[in-house]
Image (cartoon, rainbow, N blue to C red):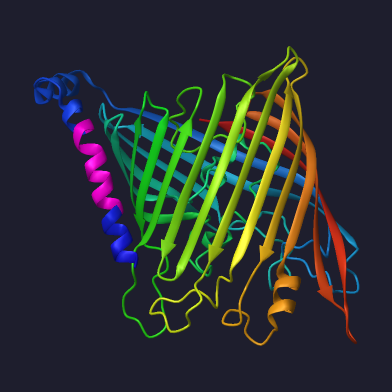
Amino acid sequence: MTSKFTFHLSLLLTVMLMPAMLLAGGNDPQAEDSAEEKEFKPTIDLGALGHMYYTAQQRGYHFGGDPSASDASTWDHDFQIYRARLLFGAQLSPKGNFFMETEIATIIGGGQSEDGVKNIAIQPVILDFQYEHVFSDFFSIIAGQQLVSHNRNGLQAAGNLLANDFTYYQYPNNMFPDSPLQGIFGRDLGVNLRGFFLNNKLEYRLGFFSGRTLFSGEAASPLRTVARLSYNIFGEDKGLYYSGTKLGEGNFLAIGGGLDRQGSYQALGVDVFWDQPIGDLGAITLNGAYSSITGGNDPEAKYYFGSMIANQLTEFLEVGYYFKDWRVQPWFKYERLNMNADESQTGESTVSDFNKYNSVTVMGGGLNYWFNGTRTNLRLSYNSTRRTIPIDGGGDETKSYGQVWLQLQAFLF
């Protein structure tokens, strides 16, 4: 099924791009390219991104917490460096550019290591390492390690988010090497094809990536295929990574959808992004997504993900309003993971218990203060996670636990 799907997408892409590539040729393109190359001088850009914050979090907060513990309601406090990235970009030719980004491997100051020593970043990891060649508006190739997702939220840049951080359930299977898709902070290695049609309003992306490379009893693995279409009704938005908010700088209404697939794993989703001035005070930002994700329902499948990725539905919504004179932006966030596993995916648990105890609701809100747009800002946020947990002796109960962040961002690139 995967090979047929990839073949059909490749054939469709070839048919779509053929007239565009012919039009892009123009009159004597070799002479034009040669003239440009003689006059062109490579340029280099250096930058950095830092997220430093104070956090207060209850021990039962879902991400890394244990809501069944006796001290789950206890609040822990800490100061941490969450992101410390170095960015390097270079325009190597009129149509070719390179981008690299590093990240610390662990949160600095957060908790303790196994030997009881406060966490420090021992060495950086490579996040992005990619080369892009833009043949025309209709067709470009990005090769290397890059963000991979079927929806907009998973392709956002960390420096211009609306909320305090990325949402978790939009791409949880691609975060770390021990994740089902064996990603690197949402990145993967491969080749991505990209282009624009209809006055640069319609964007397509079609990528082929390594994905999971270790399957029990198999010496090889299929490629991971990720496809996406997005239409921006009001105009163009050609950045490689998307914005979480544009602070009212223009009118944007983008509607998109995508597919992420490898072996028996499949994610299908739709998303919407709206950012534009509303009234004299400022601008609204709305970002939403809905996805259906499955690891497959046939345990006999050659490349089976069902035991790692159960059937699930994810819902996501962020809404904020930017008051331009005051430079403040209150926002609200909702996210829901609805488990819908079948008997082949639940292990020893019953289907009803597995789905009930693994479904989670995340709600929160905050206030951003923008010193200098998305470069330097201060964010205060509160988020809570709500889930049902079993009780010793029988029965269950639903509990909520909170997290407070005060985060300072410094970004230059």
Q: How many marks?
A: 0
Quadrant of the image occupied by residue 371: top right
For the residue pair 171 and 83, the one nearer the viewer reads as 171
Q: Is residue 405 visible?
A: no
Residue drawn at the location 54% of the way across and 41% of the way down: 156
Counting from the top left corner in percent of width and height, residue 228 is at 43, 46
Q: Quick check: is 296 in the magenta stretch?
A: no
Residue drawn at the location 74% of the way across and 33% of the way down: 378
Residue drawn at the location 42% of the way across and 61% of the way down: 261
Quadrant of the image occupied by residue 317: top right
Residue drawn at the location 70% of the way across and 30% of the way down: 377
Instruction: Quarter of the image for the N terminus: give it.
Output: bottom left
For the residue pair 156 and 90, the one nearer the viewer reads as 156
Counting from the top left corner in percent of width and height, residue 202 is at 41, 32
Query: What range is drawn magenta here?
Result: 9-20
Task: Using residue 176 as the reference point, say whether residue 40 is left or right of it.
Answer: left
Q: Is residue 408 above or below residue 275?
A: below
Q: Main secondary structure of the magenta part?
A: helix
Q: Quick check: is 17 in the magenta stretch?
A: yes
Q: Is residue 136 above or below residue 14?
A: above
Task: Using residue 134 as the reference point, say whether residue 67 is left or right of it.
Answer: right
Counting from the top left corner in percent of width and height, residue 376 is at 66, 29
Counting from the top left corner in percent of width and height, residue 70 is at 91, 74
For the residue pair 169 and 174, the one nearer the viewer reads as 169
Q: Is residue 208 visible?
A: yes
Quadrant of the image occupied by residue 165: top right
